[in-house]
Amino acid sequence: MNTDQIRDYVSRYLEATGSQVLEHHPAYITVKLSPEADKALMNRPYYWSFVERTGAEPETMSITFVFDQEQFERLQEQRKPPARSPGRPSPSPGHASGGNSAADAIGQQAGQTSILARYFGFSPGAGHNRVRQEPVTFGSGRLNQIFSSAKLKGKYVHLYEQPDNQSVLPGQSLRYLSYLNVNYKIEYTCDVKRDELHSLAICLSTGEIVNGFHEAVKHRPLSPKLPAHTHISEMISLQRAVAELEQYVERYVRSQEHSWARQAEERMADELHRIEHYYQEMIQNSKDDQEKSTIEQEYRARQEEIAWQYKPRIIVSATGCGVFHLLSPPGTRRNLANRM
Amino acid sequence: MTKAVLPPHIRNINDHLQICFNRDWMDELSSRLEQNGPWDRWAFYRLAYEAEQVQAIRNFDDLQCLSHLSQFTPLPHQLETARKVISEMRGRAILADEVGLGKTIEAGLILKEYMIRGLVRRVLILVPASLVLQWVRELNQKFGIPAVAQRKEYMWQQYDVVVASIDTAKREPHRDIVLNLDYDMLIIDEAHKLKNKKTANYQFVAAIRKKYCLLLTATPVQNDLGELFNLITLLKPGQLGGQSSFNETYVVDKRVPKNEKLLQQELSKVMIRNRRADGNVSFTKRHVKNIPLRLSPEEQELYDSVTDFVRGRYEEAGGDLSSILSLVTLQREVCSSRDAVFLTLVNLFKKTAEDSPLRPKIWELVNKIKQIKANTKAEKTMELIREIDDKVIVFTEYRATQEYLLHFFKQHNLIAVPYRGGMNRGKKDWMMDLFRGRAQILVATEAGGEGINLQFCNRIINFDLPWNPMRVEQRIGRIHRLGQEHDVSIYNLSTLGTIEEHIVNLLHEKINMFELVIGELDEILERMEQSSSLEQDLYKVMLEARNEDELRRSIARIGDTYARTRQQIAGDRQASGIPAGTIPTNGELTVIPPAAMPAVGQRAPIPPSLQPEA
């Protein structure tokens, strides 16, 4: 993910949570979080339970997400008011607390030197002027948290494609095609691992399966609202649909080449052989039954560890799923919508 | 609509391979359909899909962790090590780099990689108690791995990545909990301590259930093939055969191996040792300058009085060091600043009984402090800083001295910020930022155990010196580490005619520690196994010496021990052609010869900043 993609992603996440963007710049974004985003990102459950119990007006946090640190710092540098001469005597002579120079810096930012700032190195009042800044780069904790939050908030949907206002004549009813979409993640796992993602959908009236569903519909206007005069026909049960999709996945997996699994089996055999040698010798040389059983127990534990690590397996799970009611099959142009 | 029965969720693809469908989502979807909601929003559904796309691991081999690291860039040999451990050693390895090459980084890279791939979730990291917090910080800050230090019993299960000391973990009730968990990865730092099969530590570690395992040590085996065998057995039992076949195949005498080629080959399958000499890393130089200065008559007067006072108490205590340890501090403080010694004296005065004959004596000392008008060292430091005209860190042992210096610098229009152990993380970072930006001077009391990044500065002034060489090394290590692009200058202030003069001499002339290669001190201290006791030795010598000459001789003796150990290490190295810490050999064997070593860093270009100087 490059900087532009990250900025785009974070902006859309913030927009989806209803946060209010205060400043938008290619290098950073300053935002006042919505309660939803604050709860998801700021890790302060006590505050929110306090707000909910007392009904107090919530004060959400403002934050600057920095995408391009270098450019951001250059901008900050340019905006700084001319530095005060360092030689100016301290306003509180005789007391050289360790925090003084730092406190001055903050005092400058806040436009005043508060007493608290002078004595504690910070002043609570300055907090409003000092918006927290955070780098958001790929791999950063914050971006991972946003990813996790999005995954948590976007698992199950039920959506209708919205008709074009001009193209629907009064009195006409809309005929929808319903699809069960499942975004499958296939994990090929042994002591190493790789993933595949497949966005599949099955048409609930014809049973036709579409691969690449998400890409095909992501730009359509979809909404949870059921438009008026709607006609929906679903023939296939959820169970049936799932069975069909799973079979599709299974067929696909069978058609793949599985030398990785064979190699993992070989590695496993190799490892088992290695410890067999070691433990058989120890079992033979054991002095009594008790020692023997201790060694055998350890041997079994090691065998289990090896199977746990190497045994090849394929795990298929859904990262998200939903029912989509579309006006035209995915992969067709929208203006060719079915109309009755 | 009829309810079809689904086929089993686990099915065979072939004789060895099964496919397993997770169907949790189905029940959830169907209940939401029945109740008509609640439904998630389309915008989030799309964002979730994109997040999955970005985070999916497309192939078995390529290292993913690199694109996830924003805090630092690993060195070529560290990446190569991580790659090799994962793809060739199958996630079980001994990481045996020499000190200073970043074993922790390598372990972090491997752990991160497995975590990104979803192969590792539950992790146990066992390290010496003194390193627990350092590990936690390093993993959090450098790798964004949410590690926690184990403090309470419930934490073993509550958290996925737990760092603990082995001594805690092996005791009940912890032991039972740990042995009942399945760890996706086990990491053990200072693993050479697990060389004896009969110890409780060894048996405990052997009993932990684990998938991947990393053992970290700078000194894989000192001098015993049996110990090597035990260490490898923890990792991969049978890698060197059974105990008796190992003895038959490889051992002539416990210190003398046979079939060296084969042994090397087998070892290289489980162990990676990068060395400084491989040339994949080089450090910039250290320049040391001692700055002798003479105390003003008033200061000298105070020093002498305090020395007499302390020595008198020692004799009264009958030579019992522990009872007057706090008094010795006085003598060190007096070399630092009057503020430092003043605070300690006042506290001492308060603690002393009202009718004690000591009280007037202490008061007399306090009065002498009042006579002192200027701090010779501080004046000299300021002069030095003006001369340097660059960013500089001033280290002192004492908080009172730190406060005094901040005040002093401020009066003289120098911009300085403080840094000390008691500050919370946020404040520390803030001070760092200020130092990087506006301030010229950082006045620090703490050097150790902090993942702070000060490589933009390359000058240190030791306003006073710790008596423990490790702590001196930590100070220098703040700026002289991988990533420092310039030579490093170290200035030691040394007040003539005081104990400080001797300390500076000992550390500089005898131990020559300011010019040691990074990591060398660890080896020397490891070999001497008395890293902490130098401080005690010095106290004793200082208190017992009747005159200047005796003191000089005693300190010289201590220095000689260090010098000898250092020579020994160098000698071993030459004799075997390998660095200290591997098996001393019959002159032929190098346990891990360059050929068997991974050819790390040789193909990858070394950044110009790290290249050795001509």
Image (cartoon, rainbow, N blue to C red):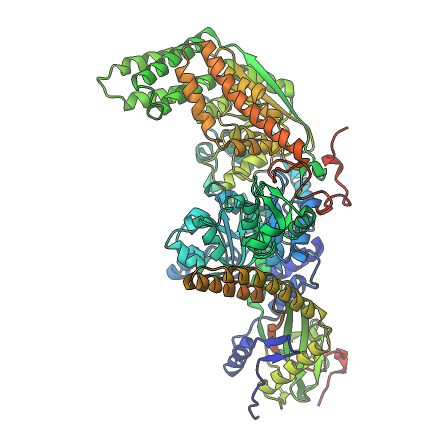
Q: Nearer the viewer, residue B256 or B234?
A: B256
Q: Quadrant of residue B482?
A: top right
Residue at image position (61%, 35%) is B580
Image coordinates for residue B298, horizontal then vertical, percent = 43, 8
Image coordinates for residue A23, horizontal then vertical, percent = 63, 51
Furthest residue toward left: B355
Image coordinates for residue B61, horizontal then vertical, percent = 70, 59
Horizontal placement of A253 versus B119: left or right?
right
Question: Is residue B609 positioned above or below B391 on the image?
Answer: below
Horizontal placement of B165 versus B284: left or right?
left
Q: Quadrant of the C terminus of chain B?
A: top right
Image coordinates for residue B503, horizontal then vertical, percent = 51, 19
Q: Nearer the viewer, residue A268 or A126?
A: A268
Give the number of marks.
0
Q: Quadrant of residue B218?
A: top right
Furthest residue toward top: B297
